[in-house]
Image (spheres, helix red, strand yellow):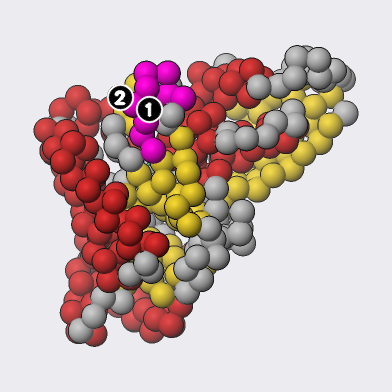
Amino acid sequence: MKIVTAVAPVNIAVIKYWGKRDETLILPINDSISATLSLEHMCAKTSIVCSPDLTETKFWLNGELQPTDSKRFQNCLREIKKLVNPNLEYLSWNLSICSENNFPTAAGLASSAAGYACLVYALAKIYEINGNISSIARMGSGSACRSIFGGWVRWQMGNTTDGSDSLAVQIAPETHWPEMRVLVLVVNDKTKTYSSTSGMKTSVETSTLLKHRAANIVPQRTKEMITAIKNKDYKTFAKLTMQDSNQFHAVCLDTYPPCFYLNDTSRAIIELIHFYNQNKGETKVAYTFDAGPNACLYLLEKDVAEVIAMINYVFPPTSLKSDYFKGDTVPSKK
Ligand code: 2P0
């Protein structure tokens, strides 16, 4: 019998992935960049048992049995098995896979990113595979390829049709910008109304803004973001992060029918951050929102206490779930 347990944190994109050119292989229409959070807070944890005594492969997520015939799960398993030494005696044994998230699942908090990164990493450990497994994690969920690495990570869209060059690379390690922090403000921890997968499919089919973004905006913005991260240039990093979040949500509005991920509280947070930065006379906080109303704030350690105090003042604990406020360090340990 073989047993492996792995942990993978979520990643929060500062240049957003939105739109696929290949739905099956999960190939994106643009590059994206994110930071992987540290292991203490928002993580998926996956344990895998591989044994000749198991009569079938089973997969539990947060205590609920999941179908193992899903295309994404099967694609990951198949691609991992392609890399396994065919003489490995336990290659044909069944698996018992148990995965848990320590934060709300499918609430627009990158749970599938952590989940598939963790699953693929644990499978690679069980089968003793080395090398860049991010392109396999990508087949589980696009953003999962970025959680394979700690620190600052770029998902290169690649240009092949087989997806072999669509993988994640580390821009800078977790030690690079130790003052950086992420605050996650949970506005709503319910499952989101429109899944990212179907939302981005409709965007690709209907949004002309998305085409303009992928062709004319993201390539240059990606270069500028990499330079800002490498130089630890917070002001430029923050502006690009907020602009990219806003353009992603503009694409969601340009989608027909539109996807509304932000709510009134999200918009109030955006206004508050701009008001705060303006009053401080410099950029202190950057917001970014994924496919849900929850805000992720990137800021430097020295500003965390004042920003938390301000948020608690403007949004008293009854309006935001303050018990979910997380102070997290990025970049992280892997
Ligand atoms: C991102 N998001 O870059 C963007 C920003 C949501 C908004 O990656 O269909 O769950 O599994 O590839 O990875 C969410 O997309 O979608 C996402 P699939 P995924 O973080």
Give the CA separation, mark 1 to mark 2: 6 Å
- Relative to 131, 319 lies left or right: left
Residue 77 vertical placement versus 176 (above, below): above
Quadrant assignment, res 55: top right
Would you say residue 68 is visible in this rendering? no
Q: What number is the disc on residue 21?
A: 2
Query: Taking 283 as reference, is 11 above or below it?
Result: above
Q: Quadrant of the C terminus?
A: bottom right
Q: Secondary structure at mark 1?
A: strand
Asked if the residue at label 1 sits under 8 Å from ligand 1, the reply is no
Q: Residue at x 26, y 75 (%)?
A: 283
Instruction: Tell me which numbered mark, 1 or 2, is placed earlier along the sequence.
Output: 2
Question: Could you tell me residue 246's position as x and y percent?
Answer: 21, 53
Q: Tell me if mark 1 has few (under 14), some (14-19) or many (20+) residues whose alpha carbon lies within 10 angstroms of its own.
A: many
| Residue neighbourhood size for the residue with mark 2, other residues' Cα within 10 Å, grouped as few (<14), some (14–19), many (≥20) | some
Spot occupied by residue 168 in the image (x, y as percentages of width and height): 47, 40
Q: Quadrant of residue 198?
A: top left
Labelled pair 1, 2 in contact (Cβ < 8 Å): yes
Q: Residue at x 60, y 27 (%)?
A: 66
- Residue closer to the observer: 142 or 272: 142
| Mark identifier at residue 27 | 1
> Which region of the structure is painted magenta?
156-164
In the rendered structure, does residue 56 fall within the stretch colored magenta? no
Q: Which percent across, then down, holds residue 320? A: 38, 66
Residue at left 36%, top 34%? 157
Q: Which residue appears at 48% of the width and 57% of the height? A: 172
The disc at residue 311 is none
